[in-house]
Structure formats: structure tokens, C-alpha cells
Image (cartoon, grey):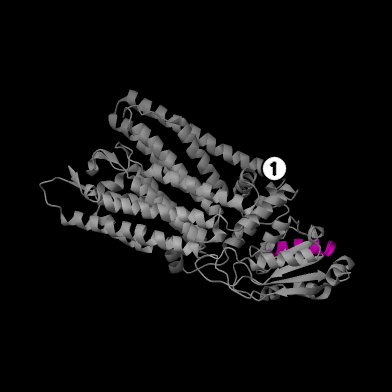
Amino acid sequence: MQSTAHRTPYFRLALAISLAVSALLFFVWSWRWPLVGDASLMHYIAFLTGRGWAPYRDLGDMNMPGSYMVEIAAMRVFGMGALAWRLFDFTQLAIASAAFFVIAWPHPVGAGSLASSASGISGRAGSKLAGLFAASLFILVHGRDGLAQGGQRDLTMAVCLIAAAACLMLVLRRAATTDAAAPKAVPWLAAAFGLLSGVAVSIKPSVLPLSLAQLVLAVFALGAPGARSGNPRQQGAVCATLLRCAVPAALAWLLVQAAVVAFLLREHALAAFLAGLHTIVPYYASLGHRPLGYILLHSISPLLPLVLIWLALLPLGSPQWWRDWERNILLAGVLFGLINCIVQARALPYYRYPLLAFLLPLMALDFTRALSIPRAAPQPIPLRTRAAQALAVIALSVGGFFLAPQSAILIHRYRWWQTDFLTSLERNLDQLGGPALSGHIQCIDTNRGCGNVLYNLRLEPATGMLSDFLIFGSSDAAAVRETRAQFSQAIMAKPPQVIVVTSPLYLGTLDDYRKLDRWPAFASYLADRYTLRTQWSPTRTERWWSREEAPAGYRIYVLRGNSAIEDQIWGK
């Protein structure tokens, strides 16, 4: 048997070098990125949790407990600064890359493998090049998404899901290389699948159907030999194998959920969390929706050319490919990732990570398999095979020689050092008292940088209201009414010495402080009780991702009659 793969060693080598160098440049060019965006807000909430504040009970938010638990654990392991968070981000990408290589690594062909003997591929299935292709592009797509996407919750969830899938595939491969009538189980790998799936569920419960679907596929793959044998003894051995896999997986999954409940009970926040599921979570889910076409396009950008080529390649492949257990596990992940993007409907960059985590290795394996389709030496290559090979070469070239280096260059152009909003606000707050403001300052913001500055200065807020969309939304929403009532009661009982208002509304179209018009009572309170001390507007754009954008502006209001603050202002 001969393979066209043997005729393209230089192509494969050049492709591997281009992919590897481009991915490595991301790490070189991004390690000094500052802590900004959602991660800074999550860091701030984790910091406040250590100071006695409780999520849900004191700090109204829509994130699931697993998000906080991962954030707190990462901060304890890696540290609290920006570099520590970059290391956490790099660690997640390394775990995802390892999972890609496990999925794509050549392995003996068996009943549960990506390529069965009936598919016409003899010897070993998989491709190291496919693992490198998927890992490099996943790293680079994440990198080109910009500074604000480091360590995102959906990235953590995606890494857990793809790592869990890799563990499940190792279980299938172990079973496929042993006696088909009595396959050997690997309990610790099954437990790892349950643990990783449980962490993903704790971040977003919507992933539960995917984990169940993958487990069902694995059960069918493990049970198929015994079902076909008809021998009761062999069927009993297969059932024992299934139990040795299912029990550790279920126990590990339940262990994570028990840890979540323990976390909520420790923070005395279980009741507040359950209440938020009926108010804050559905309200947040209703905001910022995009048209379906925009969502679909954004869910695969910038991989659209590769996806189109892959869709054209699918009909040219062998029908047996669709019956592979491992391939079906990846397909289930792709389907979940796509539905996840559509249901969330906001098309935020990090929403697509679960989709890409499964789509990239699936496409990479199909491309490399089509490139390496064997043929008998005396036979001419069929037109169907030639077409599949041509599409594979085009796709790999587009990904490795264009998309990868182009992404690295784009990342290099990000002006990570331009943090005008943060440095300006931090300087102004220092002038107003700095550490003395702890417990006496209130941000009217979500993730545009005010909470980031409070975290950098280690200042506690006056109230637990950390998200502006919860007070400037529709008064018809229960979440908005409840948050307004709690916030009003808190600031009337103890007015903050300083209030910082940022110009835009999170997940809204309002800018230039027009969000204040959404709650006239609060706007009147500011006008009656506070003096506008500073209004800062950006003088230049920033480039923290693929688009040039102007940073938010901010206003600093000072409580009237506060002699300590007035002395700071006038230098007395």
C-alpha cells in the first residue's frame, strides 16, 4: 500500500513549522497583557469574597458558582496579578493542546477508534499533524480575540469539555486493544471524565446534555462487543466493564456538585443563588441579542474558509467515518457548541470556544485523513480521491500558511500598554484619598474598568451592586426592581463618599452617560447630593483586539459636605 502522504514530507514539515512558530509567538507577545475585561471583574468578586462579601447574598451577579470557585482556586495557585492570570490562561491553552494531541495521536485501530478497519485505513488512525493544527489555531483564535478574553469562563468550560472527551476516548481505546468480549476499563480515566464534566457543568449547567450524550456514546461503544457475542458470560464481562467506568465517572461528577453546594452553604448564599436563578439569570439572558445570521457567522470566525472547505470535503469521505465512536463524540461537541452560541444569542467572542474546541480537531483529522488516503499502487487514483486530497491541501495551507501567521501578526499589533482609562482613574482616586476610600466608593459600571481599578487599589465598594445593567434596565424586570431597591436602601443609609459613573451601558446601546436617564430617581440623587469632580474622556483609541475602539469615559462625583474629600480636592 502506498499513500500520497509519503510524497508530501516537505509540505508537512513547512506546515508544522508555520503552525508551531505562530502559536509560540502568541505566548511571547501576550505575556505582558494587563488584567482587563470580565476577568478583572471576576477577580474583584473573588477578592471581595476573601474580605467577607458573599456572591449572590451581597454581590448580585448572574455567573454560576463554578466560575467563582475556579477563579478563587486560580488566584490561590497562580497569584493575584496580571502576570499570574496570563499564566493561568497559558495553562488552560496547554491543557487544551494536550487534549487535541491525545484525540489526534496515532493509535492502534480498534472498535472504538476514529477509524475502523472497515474504513480502508490500515495500521494506525490519527495524525500528529492534526493535533498541532487544531492546537495552534485554537491558541491563535483565542489570542486574536484580544486582551479581555484571557481566562474567560467559557474558555475554562471548553477546556474541561475537550479534556473530558479526550479521557473518554482513551477509555475506548484501552477497551478496543483488549479482548473484545471482556474489555478492560480504566477507572481513573473515567473518573477524570466525570470530574472535568462536573467542573464544566458548575460553570454553565447547559453543558449537561453534552456530557450525557458523550457518556451514552461511550457506553454503546463499550457494550457493542458483548451485545454482538450473544454469550451471557461475555455480556456479563462487558457489563462489569461498564460499571467500572460509569461508577467512577458518576462519583467524580457528584463530588464536584457537592463542592458547589458546600461553597454556597459556607457563604450562606444558597437561598440568594436560587432566587437569582429566577430573576437575574433570565433577565441577563434576555439582553444584547443579535440576529441569527450574525451569530452563525461569528461563531466560526475567522475559520469560515476552513469550515466551507470541510463541508465540501465531507461528501467525498468514506461513509464509515460517520460510524466511528470517537468521531461521534466530537460531532456531539460541535452540535452542542453551535446550539450554545445560538441560544446565548449575543455572539460574544468567548461564547464560541466550546464549539471551536470540538470543531478544530474534527476538521483537522478529516483534512489529514483525506491527505493520506491510501491506494493500491497499480490502480489509478479515483477522481473523488483526488478532489478530497486537493481540498485537504488547500485547507491545511489556508490554516497553516495564511490564518496562523496572520493571526500572530494581528496579535503583535495589539497596543496592550495603552491603559489610559485605568491609569487616569487610578490617579484621580489616589488624589481623593486612595486607601481611605475603601468601603466608601461606588462604581456604576460593569466591566469597562472601574472595578478593575478598585481591585488594583484593593478598595472595597460601598455596596454590592457591581453591574450597571441591573439598575438601568427595564423596570418591568424583577431583577432590576429588586436591585434598585437594595441599592437605594444601601446608599441612603450610608452615602458613598465617591461615586464613579462610566459612560456606556453594558450590553446596551446607550453611551455618553445616557444610561442615567433610565433611572431618573438616581440621576436626581446624584444632582442633589453630589458634586461632579472630574469628567474624563479618552483622547485616543485603543486596540486591545482586532478593532480600534475608544475606551469608556468616566465621571467622578463627590459627596457634598464631606470635609475630608474637600480637603483632598483643594489641597488643604
Q: Nearer the viewer, residue 165 or 402?
A: 402
Tag 1 residue: 265
| Side of 354 where 381 appears, left or right | left
Residues rendered magenta in the picture = 480-496
Does residue 425 appear left or right of residue 83 in this picture?
right
- How far across and how far down the image is residue 82, in percent? 62, 54
Q: Quadrant of the C terminus?
A: bottom right
> Is 490 in front, or is 566?
566
Q: Quadrant of the N terminus?
A: top left
Residue 172, how many percent across, how many down?
A: 37, 36
Query: Residue visible at 51% across and 42% down?
Result: 196
Q: Report the front residue among 518 and 451.
A: 451
Is residue 335 visible in this depiction of the protein? no
For image coordinates 43% across by 57% down, the residue present is 338
- Is 523 above or below relative to 223? below
384 magenta-colored:
no
Q: How many marks?
A: 1
Q: Report x, y in % for residue 259.
A: 62, 40
Where residue 397 sits, quadrant-wise, is bottom left
Q: Locate residue 395: give its quadrant.
A: bottom left
Residue furthest left as drawn: 378
Return the x and y of residue 277 as percentages of the image width and height.
62, 54
Q: Main secondary structure of the magenta part?
A: helix
Q: Amino acid at mark 1?
A: Leu
Q: Secondary structure at mark 1?
A: helix
Q: Residues within 10 Å of mark 1 (few under 14, many from 20)?
A: few
